[in-house]
Amino acid sequence: MKTLNVAIIGQGRSGRDIHGAYFHTDTERFKVVAVVETMEDRRKRAAEEFQCDTYETYQELFGRSDIDLLVNASFSHQHAAITIDLLNHGFNVLTEKPCARTPDEVQETMDAAEKNKRMFAIFQQSRFAPYFEQVQKVLDSGVLGRIVQISINFNGYARRWDWQCCQDHMGGSLYNTGPHPMDQAIMLLNYPEGNPAVFSKMDRVNTFGDAEDYVKVILTAPDRPLIDVEISSCDAFPLYTYKIQGTRGGLKGNMTNIEWKYFIEADAPEQTLIKTPLKKDDGTPAYCSEQLSWIEDSWNVEDAGTFTNATGKLYDMVYNNLVNGEPLIVTPAQVKQQIYVINECHRQNPLDRYC
């Protein structure tokens, strides 16, 4: 099995605690040979943990020809510019989300990858989360009928005071947490023909910075279900991550438990439209009432294993692309649509800056 040499830019919560932690578990396919980090103490720690070379700036990597994959886990507002520079210097790049601030930046990055014949991938690991895969299986089965509305809630109650709550660092719920539910929303909307219509409301609630920490987004497109996405830091009673309404049933669930129920249309009582007032046998007024035979099912997992499982599947995708030439499952074109939605939400809700 071929082992890919990896360099990581950044040793923060993502570069070290997600990507670095994963590489420690998959040493047969990936070997960290270099780490870029501006903070000296983090460079020293990386040298010890990975037994690799360390650099203060990513430009110092430009003279190396032994790097098969470069993971860009820099600050969010640096992702696009650094990724484009790396692609133009001949590196295959997996960049953290958000991959860019605007759709134009995504397109510029895609163009750089095509021009230099290099891989440009985005770390959207929630696409492979076990709970989301289960939701997709239920929807694909068709048992819920025509899907009318899909609600996705990534909610909780929390206060935040780090750099990811500042607009100048591309902070806020949409750029930080948002790429996860937005990627799922784009997949469930399944509208490659163009961008969806977007309605959004954003607010600052518990943040110590100037970026939003409450977001409501409605997505619509022709002949598609309405998608309702909520990302809130002021929901003290979060209920479901997913709630789906269909013509023959529905689904509700979170990251460890999903339930759905549906009825078989052929087994339902036969009804016809009655335009005259309904009445009971005794002549008194009646309501529409019937007994449907519901079929109920569920999916449960004790440990969602979201990061470990989903991260592993995303790195399967990256490895298979670089080694076997298999196409990316998470495509830049899909993420470009996601960034369009996020960008449109910000356009509709301009917030003053004071960080």
Image (cartoon, rainbow, N blue to C red):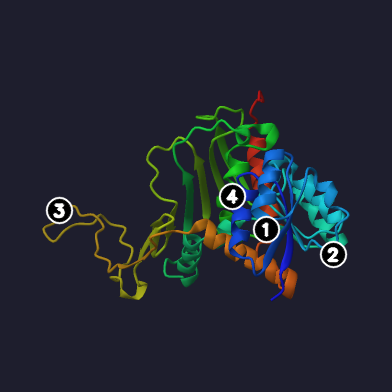
Q: In which quadrant will I find the C terminus?
A: top right
Mark 2 vs 4: CB contact within 8 A: no
Looking at the rendered structure, the kind of residue marked 2 is: Lys
> Badge 3: few (under 14), some or many (20 or more) residues near its Cα, within 10 Å?
few
Residue 33 drawn above or below residue 162: below
**Residue under circle 3?**
284
Spot occupied by residue 298 in the image (x, y as percentages of width and height): 36, 65
Q: Is residue 189 visible?
A: no
Q: Is residue 160 left or right of residue 264?
A: right
Q: Tell me which numbered mark, 3 or 4, is placed earlier along the sequence.
A: 4
Q: Is residue 260 left or right of residue 222?
A: left
Front residue of this view, candidates 185 and 112:
112
> Badge 4: few (under 14), some or many (20 or more) residues near its Cα, within 10 Å?
few
**Residue under circle 4?**
17
Q: Residue furthest top?
A: 354
Q: Quadrant of residue 91?
A: bottom right
Mark 2 vs 1: CB contact within 8 A: no
| Real-space Cα separation, disc 2 to disc 1, in angstroms | 19 Å
| Real-space Cα separation, disc 1 to disc 3, in angstroms | 57 Å
Looking at the rendered structure, the kind of residue marked 1 is: Gln
| Real-space Cα separation, disc 1 to disc 4, in angstroms | 26 Å
Mark 3 vs 4: CB contact within 8 A: no
**Residue under circle 1?**
334
Q: Which mark is residue 220?
A: none
Q: Tell me which numbered mark, 2 or 4, is placed earlier along the sequence.
A: 4
Q: Tell me which numbered mark, 1 or 4, is placed earlier along the sequence.
A: 4
Front residue of this view, candidates 91 and 16:
16
Kindly state the secondary structure of the residue where label 1 is placed.
helix
